Image (tube, rainbow, N blue to C red):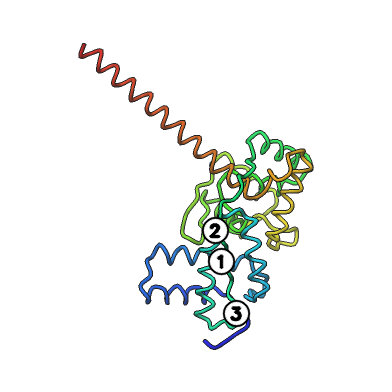
Amino acid sequence: MGENNSVKLTKELINQYRKSLEDRGFGQQTISMYSCYLNRLYDCLQEDKEITEDSLKQWVEYIKEEGFSDRTINLHISSVNGLLRFCGFNGTPVSVLSVHRREKWKELTRDEYLQLLSYVKERGSERDYLLIKTLATIGIYVTDLPYVTVEACRKGTVKLPDDREIVIPESFNQELLSYIESHVLEEGPIFVTKYGKDIDRSNIAHYIKRMGEEAGIEKGKCTASALHRLYENTQKEITQHLMSLHMQEYEKLLNEEKKKLS
C-alpha cells in the first residue's frame, strides 16, 4: 500500500486487515481481540482519524490512564503495529512497555463511590452522574462509552466491538431511559456534549479525578480505572457469596441425608 508517514484509520481498513489475518491463519479469538483494540484506537483518534507518531503517543498515554495492565497495553500496541506494517507506515512503530509489577492500586470502596455520586448529583449534572454510574455498574471502559446508545438502552444490552454483549441491570437502565426521554434523545450515544458531539475521553478521566478530590476522597483513589475495578471486585464478591451459599445448601443436604441413614 506504499510508504506513509500517516495512515487514515477507517472501518474498511480494519476489516481489510482482519481479512489479511484470516488469510494468514490467525485464530478467530486473536482476530476478534485485535479488531476490538483497533476499534478502540479508532474511537480515540481525532475526527480526521489520522494515525501519526504523535497521535499514537497520545493514544498509548490514554490507555495507560484507562488502567489496563502493561500486558494488555502491549497487546493493543501489537495490534496497531501489525496494522501499520500492513499499510506500509514509514513512521516509528510504537514501542511495547517493559512489563513489571505495578504498585498496589488504591482501591475505591463502595462507600467512597456513593460519596462521589452524591457529590456529582448535588452539583446538578445528571449526565455526569449517570456517566460515572455507567462505568461502575456495567463494567465498561471510558473508550466504550460511545457504545452506550439510545438503541442499546432500549434493548437493554450494550454491544462492544469484540462482539461481547453486556446486559444493563434493569434498575439502572430505567435511569438511563428516563434521561433519554427527558433530553429527547432519539438515537446514537447518550453521553455527548450539549452540541451532540462525543465527549473528549481524556476530559472524562480528568473530570472524575477532580470530582473525587472535591468530594473529599483520598487523592489517587478516584479514577476511571478505579471505577472499573470497583465493578470487577463487586462481581467477585457476589460470586464468592453465591458459592458460599451453594456450599451451605450442599452441606445441609448431606447432613439431612446422613440423619436419614443413621
Are the residues flagged by discs 3 and 1 in contact, CB closer than 8 Å?
Answer: no
Residue 34, placed above or below residue 149 = below
- In the shown orientation, is residue 144 left or right of residue 86? right
SS at mark 3 in the image: strand
Query: What type is the residue that disc 3 sits on?
Result: Val
Write the residue at 63% across / 43% down. Answer: 175
Residue behind mark 3: 7
Residue behind mark 1: 96
Label 3 crowd (10 A; few <14 / some 14-19 / many >=20): some
Identify the residue at the far left of this view.
Answer: 261
Residue 208: where, in percent of width, then height? 71, 49
- Quadrant where the C terminus is found in the figure: top left
Identify the residue at the far bottom of this view.
Answer: 2
Looking at the image, which is closer to me, 52 or 204?
A: 52
Q: Is residue 186 visible?
A: no
Identify the residue at the far top of this view.
Answer: 262
Query: What type is the residue that disc 1 sits on?
Result: Val
Query: What type is the residue that disc 2 sits on?
Result: Val
Residue 39: where, in percent of width, then height? 55, 66
- Number of numbered callouts drawn: 3
Write the residue at 53% across / 73% down. Answer: 81
SS at mark 2 in the image: loop
Q: Earlier in the sequence, mark 3 or mark 1?
A: 3
Looking at the image, which is closer to me, 80 or 191?
A: 80
Write the residue at 53% across / 83% down. Answer: 88
Mark 1 and mark 2: Cα distance apart in space: 9 Å
Nearer to us: label 3 or label 1? 1
Residue behind mark 2: 99
The quadrant where residue 234 appears: top right
Residue 20, placed above or below residue 157 = below
- In the shown orientation, is residue 11 left or right of residue 53? left
Mark 2 and mark 3: Cα distance apart in space: 28 Å
